[in-house]
Image: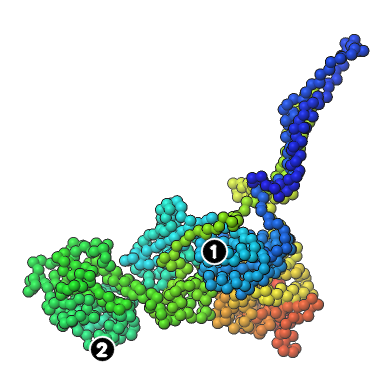
Amino acid sequence: MWSLGPVGFLSPWLLAGLVLLPVLWLILRAVPPAPLRRRFPGVALLLGLDDRESQSDRTPWWLLLLRILAVAAAIIGFAGPVLNPSERAAPGSGPLLILADATWADARDWPARAARIEALLGEARRAGRPAALVALTDPPPETRFDPAEAVLASLPGVAPRPWQPDPAALDDWAATLEGRFETVWLSDGLARDSRDTLLTVLEAHGSVRVIQTPRRIAALRPPKLDGTAIALEAVRTPSGGAESVTVAAHGLDPAGIERRLAAATLDFAPGDAVARADLSLPPELRNRVTRFEIDGARSAAAVALTDDALRRREIGLVESRESRESTELMSPLHYLRVALEPQADLVSGDLPALIPANPDVIVLADAGSLPPAEAEALQAWVEDGGLLLRFAGPRLAASDAGRDGDDPLMPVRLRAGGRSVGGSMSWGEPKTIAPFAADSPFHGLTVPDDVTVRAQVVAQPGPDLAARVIAQLSDGTPLVTRKPLGDGQVVLMHVTANAEWSSLPLSGLFVSMLERLAISARADADAAANLAGTTWQPVEVMDAEGRLTGTDTRAAVAGEDLANGDLGPELPPGLYEGEAGRYALNVTRADTTLAPARWPARIAVEGLDRAAERPLGGLLLALAVALMAIDAVASLLVGGRLRGLRAASVVLALLLAPVPPAEAQEGTAPATPPVNTFPSGSTAAEPPMDPQAEDFAQAATGSVVLGHILSGDPAVDDIARAGLEGLGRTLWQRTSVEPAAPMAVDPETDELAFFPLLYWPITAATPIPSGAAYDKLNAYLRGGGMIVFDTRDAGIAGLGTTTPEGRRLQAIARPLDVPPLSPVPEDHVLTRTFYLLQDFPGRHQGRDVWVEAAPDEEPTPGMPFRNLNDNVTPVVIGGNDWASAWAMDEIGMPLYPVGRGMAGERQREMAYRFGVNLVMHVLTGNYKSDQVHVPALLERLGQ
């Protein structure tokens, strides 16, 4: 194909005819128009005269131009012009290697990438080229080139993963490549260090083409607490103009239903790759947040899971004898309970009982010197990451705590006695609180003017005192001091926890200060050093689209691996649970940046989205015909042969002549045909169906066809096909239903409405459908279709999660619009649509089979069956492996054994009968529940 700008020509040699147009112009210019004949009697006088000089008239220039344009349009039309021609690789016998990054960045447009891979494999199949398909996030041990049609069959099993390719795994895979082959690399558009090394290896084996479309990719860094606000950061690539993204907080409401709880807008400045925003939520609402998500960005990197770092803290309040015996308003713990209860889980008790409970914070209100054993245990707890919050009081002021030496459980040394209004160290009047410094955890809090301090314990001056003061009075006296101790910290409020020494506990400032201190507890408890030596069990894992799936079959991971965060098949992103709580492993980190992939100039890069080809030959040929028609009329007019009524009729005929559209002349449909939408919502023209989809529709609607949904396991899919073939043969022999050969169905690409019944075998690795596929599945169920889910586990799981298949079924069925289910009752129509049945075996003698729950009503007196509605149960769930029991070979012999001896054959017969009842039920509804059938049924039942 030769191209001229956006237009290509299938037969460019025909364009050589355009060179003859000037010659044609000269010829037409020299030939005069036909002479006019008029009868004039006087001409007889001129007979016999000889005109020695003759001069011919010339054709008008505009008529010549019209003819030249008509000929040129015909020449160009026959040359096969095509608008936006696709670049086709030259047919050859060399192997074709298709690489897909298949990372989370590909999840958003994976259907388009799969379609492009399918087109590449189709071209390879037509050219007879062997091919191989490799996802770099899951490279195979070795690369084998198979026939393109075999590789195409494996395409549904390839899906993006929520991690980046492992450089070491890529090096091992690249070392296995042998021979010459062409490579087509579908890039996700992100830069990474492993690209250059792999590109060098691939170029040593042949040419490399890259498919990459410039697009915006956004990711969300893990959220973190900044004071009481949640700091959110988003990154993007490529950085460009100003842009805003919305980050939504999702969590459970009080009823346990997941909802959108809040949202924040992050604004990217022009040229910036990072955007930041703070989201302030009440503690109760913040504790409910389970994840943050960028609206409209369907990828794992656009989702940031939350863990215990943003949730309620557990605070232990140490009770003393005085606190238990004092009145409520005078109790040192009363104001603490009121302030902390809305934002934390409070645990009360004595110190020996609280330390083993391992709370995040332990509060000591007016405690003096501790017994040595309790002091040692408390110090070890703080060094392990706890926060000890102490309050002053008369007992602390009178004790020796913090007097002699450096007490590890006191942030500063204290002077004997205290300072109060009218005391030995007297103030003239109560003191106010100074504004908080920028490095204080209380920075940003407003200090009310009515909060005053009347008494306090005083810190001894020392070289470390200034660094340990985080709040002070207006005269510079320390009010709150803090020091680190191991991985934890010790904080002392130099006033009482009640209103005895100050009005601080009566203010909202007291609540805010305690909230800031509680949030800082164990802020770094999940750091790498603290994860060492621990074990974490994954409870929910995330896929490339950011969806969470529960799991309890994965092996536990070491804390060191979790801290490193090297995602992969053995360490997917998600929620992990350990003795210390929950840990969220996200796709991104706090320092994650995104950059677009750059390719050398020698590498051909093309876009993922190609403009649809539009043949122009038919349009140009139609134009040539129209110009020739106009030329014919114009020639008649110039020659004087069209006058009066005859000329008007010819012009009217030309105007009314129908001109077929160019698409019809070419015999192909446009990529996006125009559709005229009327106000009522109807359309004037429906877009033509894809040829492959049209063939699928014709095959599925020519007769009754049973379908089986692809499980991702070719062996299981073969059993499902053979089982439906055996069931279809049984229906042919025993009923009036004559089904055609069963068809494999992919809910991602195929229309489901053609099938009355879909059999879905579930394996532990059955892929989770996409959101679009779930929309089609739900529409199919609402429209009267039936899906038979078969876990093939002998019904061990029931509807629970005791087998991998059962757990996978729960994950698949969770987004489906499934009604309440119950085991098949004795009077359900499935027990009598064709055969009278009491159980529903397959290859296994399973337990309960689950269907839509029947109305909760009693049968009418004298009637053995309830008057059920006419709906068909949308789902049937079991684990009896019905397909294996139904399966037959070409001559009708069973493929798989069932049971033992005659008992097994009886079990197979009951499986066939159950299959017949299923098909009859989905085709006829609950008509057997009509009372007109009761006498016949009673007679057969012997009643």
Specify which label sits upstream in the sequence, 1 or 2. Answer: 1
* Residue 229 % position (x, y): 34, 64
* Residue 413 % position (x, y): 18, 77
At 72% from the left edge and 84% from the top edge, which residue is drawn? 897
Left or right of 33? Residue 446 is left
Q: Note whether 646 is above or below 914 in the view shown.
A: above
Left or right of 851? Residue 351 is left
Which residue of the protein is positioned furthest toward the front in this rendering?
204
Q: Which residue matches tag 2?
A: 373
Q: Tell us which disc is closer to us: 1 or 2.
A: 1
Q: Amino acid at mark 1?
A: Asp
* Residue 860 % position (x, y): 62, 76
Q: Amino acid at mark 2?
A: Ala
Left or right of 495? Residue 359 is right
Tag 1–tag 2 contact (CB < 8 Å): no
Q: Is residue 87 visible?
A: yes
Q: Is residue 653 visible?
A: no
Say few, some or many: other residues with alpha carbon within 10 Å of mark 1 (under 14 / 14 to 19 / 20 or more).
some
Say few, some or many: other residues with alpha carbon within 10 Å of mark 2 (under 14 / 14 to 19 / 20 or more).
few
Q: Which residue matches tag 1?
A: 196
* Residue 434 % position (x, y): 19, 64
Identify the mark at residue 368; answer none if there is no mark: none
At 44% from the left edge and 81% from the top edge, which residue is drawn? 535
Using the image as rendered, state which of residue 64 and residue 942 is in the foreground. 64
| Among the 4 quarters of the image, the one containing residue 830 | bottom right
Dot 2 falls on a residue whose secondary structure is helix
